[in-house]
């Protein structure tokens, strides 16, 4: 009998539809897998009773030949989405005990379409991080074994603070680990500077950050409002397309959410890419670039050429300014957004002699080191006398970055091919040096996309010489996610789907 | 640009985050590392460039000016660490 956790989302859907399997059966198999994988620390809350109740309701609808596009399919939810009555803390201590009295629009769309919630997934605190190590709930171990490690060695490390094990990336590290370890069929994630795409690359799965405004941000814990976007992580391009179709869509509660109807993205999967023009930006060829990444990138271009696309070199001259400008814009918006954590309305509260002391003590003990650092940077660049020099200047540079892309697209380029990350996954604790900028460099290929509001997809494209997954990124025109799904599937076909690691945990 | 210790204390107060004397030098180092990283932007020519205000060109949608929400005080207070008679409780702010 087939193990339900080995199915793709699309395969599970088809088995439910043909009644070859029940949602209860698939959901139970995933809950058992989650239980066995506890030591990976991917889930921060498991909603087993709720999952089984939702599965049973789905089975009733499926028996009547009713139900939505995701009917009965168990998925995981990043801890950043408000889920009514369920643990929602963006993995921060400051939201201690917070259980929202409302549901985020994205998760409401998923439940509307029949999906089953397995629980909430670990992440970097307030999505600020690239390794899942800033989580109040501790790091997540990637299901990928470190090079030349035995299963016993890895199991021992799991019991010993996860030292030496690989990071699943971040901030959506719980989501990527859970999907790659087959603990859920797919998961929600979010991306402010690369938090969907970098974890996808590190764990050999697919992740898409859609165009800014494609998914509603209502009910997502805000980090940087002009950059944040919801998106899925899944094991295949088709599964990501199925998930995004349900997650996206208009919402009167988010004024930046697009009113345009959502296409059926799945129909774009398998569509020919013949005749499409793919740009390869010369500025992404960084000095001292990892040779394996460079070779993979060239191979990806060759695959698309073989599939009938035209590959041309393009120039995005302002690329190198994107990361520094991001580290002004994102902390600035975060310092404003996170002002709401005051110890008065929800979450943690530390007593103080007066209201200011209450704020200061609550925020000092509730926020972790990385969040405190970014809030202070953000406060500084917005403070009197520095606002023009930092924030306004960064927003002008953002205009330049966007213009680069607009010019390339106006010249007839349909999508842009780049590496996803500067390297394969690194180890937990490996980048905890005194210089925070070292970790920030992980986002060098992904952050431009957020700065320009464009859609970007990452698909697994091969393995490093050490056997770790590597991904490629495709960047599209605004609201042209369909072309990205077609191209990413062409890469998936040529590269072959990443063979995910067998359970050792 | 770089910040000195008194600037770190001032920023922390503006951000309403308590910092101890012991952690101030460490924070100063980290903040200055980030400020050094973003220094490269000073060289970019941004003359005549409009700062970005909306990443996707779209008109702010308008809706009818009617009440769509309300009457849910218990839900608003449900997660508060301290409440009394339907109010949030804070230390005395008016002498």
Image (cartoon, rainbow, N blue to C red):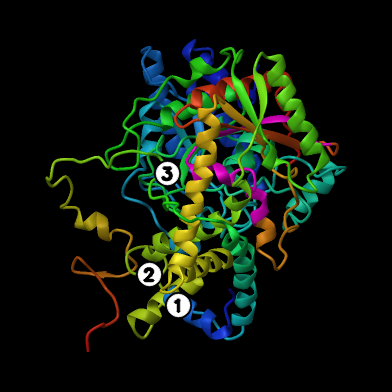
Q: Marks 1 and 3, how far apart in space? A: 36 Å
Q: Position of residue B91 (x, y in %)?
A: 29, 80
Q: Say which chain tag 1 marks.
A: A
Q: Marks 1 and 2, how far apart in space? A: 9 Å
Q: Which residue is mark 2?
A: A343
Dots 3 and 2: beta carbons under 8 Å? no
* Residue in the foreground of this view, choosing between A405 and A16: A405
Check disc 2: other Cα within 10 Å, few if <14, some if 14-19, many if 20+. many
Q: Position of residue A346 (x, y in %)?
A: 35, 63
Q: Residue at x 81, y 37 (%)?
A: A292
Q: Which residue is mark 1?
A: A361
Dots 1 and 3: beta carbons under 8 Å? no
Q: Is residue A168 magenta?
A: no
Dots 1 and 2: beta carbons under 8 Å? yes
Residue A309 can be seen, yes or no: yes
* Residue in the foreground of this view, choosing between A363 and A493: A493
Q: Position of residue A212 (x, y in %)?
A: 44, 39
Marks 3, 2: nearer the viewer: 3
Q: Say which chain tag 3 marks.
A: B
Q: Residue at x 85, y 44 (%)?
A: A149
Q: Position of residue A479 (x, y in %)?
A: 44, 29
Quarter where residue A183 is shown: top right
Q: Say which chain tag 2 marks.
A: A
- Are the residues flagged by discs 1 and 2 from a single subunit? yes
Q: Secondary structure at mark 1?
A: helix
Q: Marks 3 and 2, how far apart in space? A: 33 Å
Residue B55's disc is 3
Please identify the quadrant where the N terminus of chain A is shown.
top right
Q: Is residue A449 magenta?
A: yes
The residue segment tinted magenta is: A440-464
């Amino acid at each position: 009998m087939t193990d339900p956790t080995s199915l793709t989302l699309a395969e599970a859907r088809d088995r439910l539809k043909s009644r070859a399997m029940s949602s209860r059966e698939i959901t139970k198999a995933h809950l058992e897998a989650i239980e066995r994988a506890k030591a990976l620390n991917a889930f921060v809350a498991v909603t087993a009773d709720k999952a089984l109740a939702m599965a049973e309701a789905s089975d009733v609808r499926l028996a009547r030949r009713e139900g939505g596009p995701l009917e009965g399919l168990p998925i995981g939810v990043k801890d950043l989405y408000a889920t009514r009555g369920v643990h929602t803390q963006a993995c921060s201590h400051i939201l201690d005990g917070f259980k929202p009295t409302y549901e985020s629009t994205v998760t409401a769309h998923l439940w509307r379409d029949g999906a089953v919630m397995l629980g909430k997934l670990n992440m970097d605190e307030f999505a600020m991080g690239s390794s899942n190590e800033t989580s109040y709930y501790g790091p997540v171990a990637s299901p990928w074994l470190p090079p030349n490690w035995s299963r016993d060695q890895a199991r021992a490390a799991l019991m010993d603070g996860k030292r030496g094990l690989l990071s699943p990336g971040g901030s959506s590290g719980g989501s990527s680990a859970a999907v790659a370890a087959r603990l859920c069929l797919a998961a929600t994630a979010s991306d402010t500077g690369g938090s969907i795409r970098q974890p996808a690359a590190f764990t050999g799965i697919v992740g898409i950050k859609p165009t800014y405004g494609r998914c509603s941000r209502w009910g997502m814990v805000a980090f940087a409002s002009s950059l944040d976007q919801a998106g899925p992580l899944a094991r295949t391009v088709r599964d990501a397309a199925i998930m995004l179709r349900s997650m996206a869509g208009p919402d009167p509660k988010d004024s930046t959410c697009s009113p345009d109807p959502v296409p059926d993205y799945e129909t774009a999967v398998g569509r020919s890419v013949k005749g499409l023009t793919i740009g390869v930006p010369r500025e992404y060829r960084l000095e001292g670039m990892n040779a394996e990444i460079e070779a993979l990138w060239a191979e990806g271009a060759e695959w698309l050429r073989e599939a009938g696309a035209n590959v041309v070199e393009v120039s995005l001259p302002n690329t190198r300014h994107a990361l520094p400008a991001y580290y002004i814009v994102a902390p600035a918006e975060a310092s404003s957004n996170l002002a709401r954590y005051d110890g008065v309305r929800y979450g943690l509260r530390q007593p103080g002699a007066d209201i200011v002391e209450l704020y200061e003590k609550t925020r000092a003990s509730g926020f972790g080191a990385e969040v405190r650092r970014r809030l202070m940077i953000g406060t500084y660049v917005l403070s009197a006398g520095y606002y023009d020099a930092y924030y306004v200047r960064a927003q002008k540079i953002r205009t330049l970055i966007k213009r680069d892309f607009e010019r390339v697209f106006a010249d007839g380029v349909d999508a842009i091919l780049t590496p996803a990350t500067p390297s394969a996954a690194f180890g937990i604790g490996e980048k905890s040096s005194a210089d925070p900028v070292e970790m920030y460099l992980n986002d060098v290929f992904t952050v431009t996309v957020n700065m320009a509001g464009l859609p970007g997809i990452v698909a697994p494209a091969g393995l490093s010489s050490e056997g770790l997954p590597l991904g490629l990124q495709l960047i599209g025109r605004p609201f042209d996610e369909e072309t990205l799904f077609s191209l990413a599937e062409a890469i998936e076909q040529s590269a072959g789907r990443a063979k995910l690691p067998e359970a050792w945990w | 640009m770089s910040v000195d210790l008194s600037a770190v204390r001032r920023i922390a107060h503006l951000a309403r985050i308590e910092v101890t004397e012991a952690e101030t030098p460490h924070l100063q180092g980290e903040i200055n590392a980030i400020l050094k990283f973003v220094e490269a932007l000073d060289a970019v020519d941004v003359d005549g460039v409009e700062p970005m205000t909306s990443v996707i060109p779209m008109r702010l949608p308008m809706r009818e000016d009617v009440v769509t929400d309300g009457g849910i005080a218990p839900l608003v207070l449900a997660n508060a660490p301290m409440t009394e008679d339907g109010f949030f409780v804070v230390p005395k702010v008016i002498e």
